[in-house]
Image: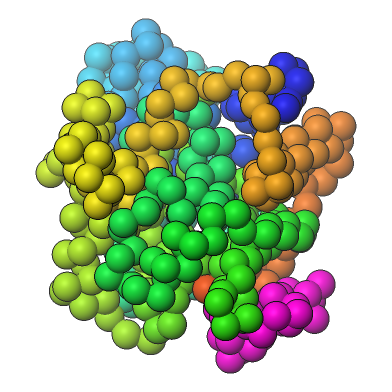
């Protein structure tokens, strides 16, 4: 169980909160690149960490993220004119450049010095891996953006989906690193992979290891097999909000990120990629249908087809038949149904956690320690970007007694882990 004050620390991310400031001093996903498709295209609304913002791609093709409301009379820049490398409020024509400085006030006399005194919040952005990232922290020179593998592959090797989730960001991260729920929530979804389906059905209580790293956690979940070997699923949690999800054999790799919109709503990002080949048409179709970590989306929106308003289209007959444990179609919708069902921020003082929750406990501690340390004036512990570039997650079968960290490394055939694991 968490103390009430710890649950507040963990989940509250608005400006001025310890966790909010911790998040702001990392690069975080903000938009899908397709939201700003060309220079001087229409601005889009963005809400992150409780802040109302507007993003636009300027005439030079750079992405800018600024506060939403004009400091003159608080009109929204969403209705503004994106023109000549700046955003102009349509109320009185006040214009601001990419650095947030006011560059023109046509409603004032030409001799007025007012524009020299006016500035709006502006956050740096970078495009990487099909995602627009932003840094909302206090450092004049932001840290390096981690070089995730999915950002180094060609566009046709990768699929990125963004959606809105009605829950606190913590629930999303917790679901990603919870291996034991595969044997229940997603039961039936792996039947086409016979050996994996049997393993999950017959081994419902995996042994969990969670190793604290400079970037977050390396998590291992072990299930013993009938032949005496051990099936391991290895997951990387990279602070503050991204997880690398185990892959099998030569299948595409997966990652998810959960970014706070505010304390009770999140943006979900799902990324699937392959390092050596394009994703096939059949793989992309399967992903877009919601059969894996990408939800099936309502076209032109960030709302999944299966959502809380329609009870995720649960089929009670299918649930009762045992063909599907939940009666809810697809892995993404099944996850959404349980993490949104907690209704905003759950009361974690009521929880009874078991041995299968070790990784979740460690993730919470990592985030709370980071927020407290930063609040107390300590630097945020960040790994070298090149180390992040080496990280991969995998599912692998090893002989009993073999250390899973070394087995993970060898199964991928490259040095994928940071120095602490050698």
Percent across and percent down for residue 409 are 65, 83
How far across and how far down the image is residue 143, in percent?
66, 55
Relative to 326, 240 lies left or right = right
Instruction: Please state, as top left, top right, bottom left or bottom right, where the N terminus lies in the image.
Output: top right
Is 66 located above or below residue 385 in the figure?
above
From the image, which quarter does the C terminus lie in? Answer: bottom right
The answer to which of 315 and 65 lies nearer the viewer is 315
* Image: 33 above or below 82: below
Identify the residue at the far top of this view: 73
Highlighted magenta segment, given as a residue range: 396-422
Image quadrant of residue 389?
A: bottom right
Say left or right for 269 vs 393: left
**Vertical position of residue 413 compared to residue 365: above or below:** below
Quadrant housing residue 97: top left
Residue ID at (62%, 39%): 23
In percent of the image, x 39 and y 19: which residue is there? 69
Give the total number of marks visible in the rendering. 0
Residue 279 in sight in this render:
yes
Decide whether residue 415 is among the magenta residues. yes
- The answer to whether any part of residue 86 appears in the image is no
Image x and y of residue 190, in percent: 34, 63
In-front residue for pair 289/257: 289
User: Relative to 379, is 130 on the left or the right?
Assistant: left
Q: Relative to 383, is 195 on the left or the right?
A: left
Residue 111: x and y, percent?
Answer: 42, 18
Q: How is the image coloured?
A: rainbow
**299 in the magenta segment:** no
């Amino acid at each position: 169980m968490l103390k009430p004050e710890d649950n507040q620390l963990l989940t509250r991310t608005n400006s001025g909160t310890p966790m909010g400031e911790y998040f702001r001093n990392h690069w975080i996903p903000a938009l899908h690149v397709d939201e700003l498709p060309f220079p001087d295209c229409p601005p889009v609304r963005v809400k992150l960490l409780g802040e109302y913002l507007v993003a636009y791609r300027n005439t030079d093709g750079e992405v800018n993220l600024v506060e939403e409301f004009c400091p003159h009379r608080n009109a929204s820049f969403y209705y503004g004119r994106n023109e000549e490398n700046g955003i102009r409020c349509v109320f009185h024509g006040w214009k601001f450049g990419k650095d947030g400085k006011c560059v023109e006030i046509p409603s004032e006399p030409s001799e007025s010095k007012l524009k020299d005194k006016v500035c709006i919040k502006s956050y740096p952005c970078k495009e990487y891996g099909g995602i627009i990232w932003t840094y909302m922290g206090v450092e004049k020179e932001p840290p390096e953006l981690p070089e995730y593998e999915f950002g180094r592959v060609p566009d046709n090797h990768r699929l990125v989906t963004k959606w809105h989730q009605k829950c606190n960001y913590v629930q999303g991260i917790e679901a990603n690193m919870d291996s034991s729920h595969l044997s229940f929530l997603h039961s039936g979804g792996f039947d086409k992979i016979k050996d994996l389906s049997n393993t999950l059905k017959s081994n419902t209580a995996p042994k969990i290891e969670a190793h604290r790293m400079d970037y977050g956690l390396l998590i291992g979940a072990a299930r013993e097999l009938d032949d005496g070997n051990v099936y391991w699923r290895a997951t990387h949690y990279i602070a503050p909000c991204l997880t690398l999800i185990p892959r099998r054999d030569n299948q595409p790799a997966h990652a998810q990120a959960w970014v706070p919109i505010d304390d009770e709503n999140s943006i979900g990002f799902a990324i699937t990629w392959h390092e050596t080949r394009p994703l096939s048409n059949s793989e992309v179709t399967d992903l877009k249908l919601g059969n894996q970590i990408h939800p099936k989306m309502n076209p032109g929106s960030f709302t999944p087809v299966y959502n809380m308003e329609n009870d995720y289209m649960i089929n009670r007959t299918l649930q009762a038949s045992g063909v599907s444990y939940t009666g809810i179609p697809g892995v993404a919708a099944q996850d959404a149904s349980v993490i949104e069902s907690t209704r905003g921020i759950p009361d974690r003082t009521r929880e009874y956690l078991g041995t299968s929750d070790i990784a979740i406990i460690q993730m919470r501690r990592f985030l709370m320690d980071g927020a407290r340390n930063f609040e107390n004036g300590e630097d945020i512990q960040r790994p070298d970007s090149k180390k992040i570039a080496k990280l991969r997650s995998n599912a692998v079968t090893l002989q009993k007694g073999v250390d899973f960290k070394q087995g993970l490394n060898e199964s991928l055939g490259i040095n994928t882990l940071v120095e602490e694991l050698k």
